């Protein structure tokens, strides 16, 4: 008998009709930048100390298109073995670098940032991985699944529905910089 829990159904949590559509593509949830926000962001960058400006430039922080968080190297591994989580994290880092997605390039002015989260609090069927700003949560993010997420989601704006269990883009509030 198979003791594996059934994969959770994919849930779309959005009032945006494009995102609730069964044939959703991830780029419909990835257009949060307005010219006003860009101007405000640029003003913030111009005001920070030079060492922060160097950091912003070298990491491509102002060119981030997507931010991927993965549960890995947990203090208390619950969703998967710690070794499996580290293998997934290492794979994600390596592939983003190999595909030159980790830095802006002359061909593509945006980049994908990645962060190892100790625990994303889902704590089942891991490794758990979430892609922002799309707000797409994936379970079972093994290296093989991560490769599919990279090819379909990060490169072609298509959610890997087989492994996604929630789509919930964060609401935007038109934040502005204060003096
Ligand atoms: S241990 Fe992976 S989400 Fe909590």
Image (tube, grey):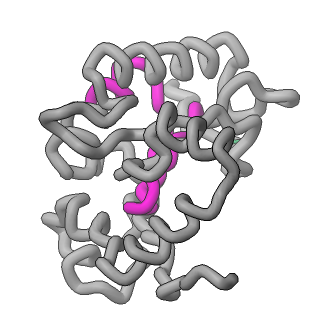
Q: Is residue 49 left or right of residue 156?
A: right
Q: Which of 7 and 172 is in front in this view?
A: 172
Q: At 50% from the left edge and 27% from the top edge, which residue is drawn? A: 2
Q: In this view, does 93 lie to the left or right of 148?
A: right
- Residue 23 lies, in percent from the top left, at 14, 65
User: Does residue 140 show up?
Assistant: no
Q: Is residue 111 above or below residue 10?
A: above
Residue 132 covered by magenta stretch? yes
User: Does residue 168 show up?
Assistant: yes
Q: Residue 117 sits in which quadrant?
A: top right
Q: Residue 5 sits in which quadrant?
A: top right
Q: At 42% from the left edge and 56% from the top edge, which residue is drawn? A: 136
Q: Which of 118 and 141 is in front in this view?
A: 118
Q: Which of 111 and 106 is in front in this view?
A: 106
Q: At 38% from the left edge and 49% from the top edge, which residue is drawn? A: 63
Q: Is residue 167 left or right of residue 159?
A: right
Q: At 57% from the left edge and 32% from the top edge, which residue is drawn? A: 127
Q: Residue 51 sits in which quadrant?
A: top right
Q: In this view, does 47 lie above or below 137?
A: below
Q: In this view, does 118 lie to the left or right of 21?
A: right
- Residue 160 lies, in percent from the top left, at 27, 45
Magenta residue span: 125-148
């Amino acid at each position: 008998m198979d003791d594996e829990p059934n994969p959770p159904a994919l849930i779309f949590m959005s009032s945006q009709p494009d995102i609730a559509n069964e044939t959703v593509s991830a780029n419909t949830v990835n257009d949060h930048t307005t010219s006003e926000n860009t101007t405000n962001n640029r003003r913030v960058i111009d005001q920070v100390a030079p060492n922060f400006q160097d950091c912003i430039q070298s990491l491509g922080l102002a060119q981030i298109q997507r931010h991927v968080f993965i549960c890995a190297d947990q203090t208390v591994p619950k969703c998967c073995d710690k070794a499996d989580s580290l293998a997934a994290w290492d794979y994600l880092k390596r592939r983003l670098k190999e595909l030159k997605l980790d830095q802006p390039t002359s061909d593509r002015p945006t980049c994908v940032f990645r962060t190892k989260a100790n625990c994303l609090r889902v704590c089942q069927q891991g490794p758990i991985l979430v892609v922002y700003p799309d707000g797409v949560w994936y379970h079972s993010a093994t290296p093989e699944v991560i490769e599919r997420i990279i090819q379909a989601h990060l490169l072609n704006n298509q959610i890997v529905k087989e492994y996604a269990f929630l789509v919930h883009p964060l609401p935007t509030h038109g934040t502005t910089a204060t003096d």
